[in-house]
Amino acid sequence: MEKIFDTHAHYFDAKFDTLEGGADAILSSEEFRSTVCGVVNVGTDPKSSKIAVEMAKKNDFMYATVGIHPSDAQNVCKRTPDEELADIEAMVSDEKARKENKIVAIGEIGFDYYWQPVNRDLQYEYFDKQMSLAEKYGLPVVIHNRDSHADVFDMICRYPNVIGVIHSCSMSAEMVREVVKRGWYVSFAGPLTYKNAQKVREACAAVPLDRLLIETDAPYLSPVPYRGKINNSVYMQKTAETAAEIHGISFDEIARKTAENAKFLFGL
Ligand SMILES: [Zn+2]
């Protein structure tokens, strides 16, 4: 069976510490090594971004992104945006160090209008400045979008030289076609398998095979039948199966294609 490439996980998350052996036990297991060919470990603030890098350097199949998530911008970052973002820029500005550290994108960045209270101005400042960083250093971005479709789309349009991935896509099929037209990739996580997620499956069907990615968002968003459990990349086989059904191709084809796309987008 073809191995799968998980384009979005947070293996530094404290939830993994509740499992025996933590994330390391999962990442080194026989099952993991025989089913997963790649993982992008996605940072959400300066500290977790540094840990994401350390983990990537320890695991041959793992890569890292560095960035500040809109919720972390509001709740975790205590310094000014420019001070916090200086830490992110320091990790990507030197190309040689960036490659040694296996940093492949700026992320996770974006808007989250779900968790209250929402500070739109602050989220905008962080998102906009990180899009600028991506443009400056020629890096792709990993976008978080929750209940903020129109504003995310506006930001994408403001930076025509930046491409990236819409992670755990919840956009409509119509909007997906618009972002694809602009060169973007679209990624689906466990919700693709949920019974009442017809809209997500329609959006997946609207993504051409050369722009489609799959992911876990581990430890979150486990696919059926693992809902409620701590997610990991092995479970993503279920998401891959569903994506294969939607596109009318085999599991091996979807696994091969999505891994190829991940390698292309992240320059691996
Ligand atoms: Zn995430």
Image: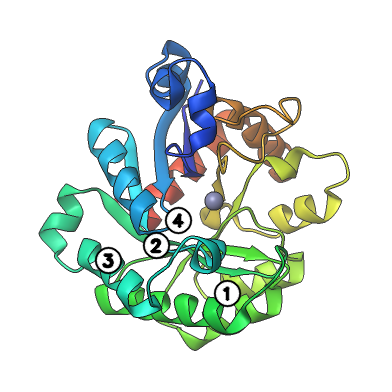
What amino acid does circle 2 point to? Gly
Q: Secondary structure at mark 3?
A: helix
> Taking 136 as reference, is 191 left or right?
right
Dividing the picture into quadrants, the one containing residue 229 is top right
Place of residue 35 in the rendered image (x, y in percent of width and height, measured from the top left): 48, 22
Q: Which residue is mark 1?
A: 181
Earlier-in-chain disc, 4 versus 3: 4
Q: Is mark 4 within 8 Å of ligand 1?
A: yes
Q: How many marks?
A: 4
Q: Which residue is mark 2?
A: 67
Q: Which residue is mark 4?
A: 44
Q: Secondary structure at mark 4?
A: loop
Dividing the picture into quadrants, the one containing residue 230 is top right
Give the mark toward the camera: 1 or 2: 2
Give the mark toward the camera: 1 or 4: 4
Give the residue drawn at x 36%, y 81%.
132
Place of residue 149 in the rendered image (x, y in percent of width and height, measured from the top left): 69, 73
Q: Secondary structure at mark 1?
A: helix
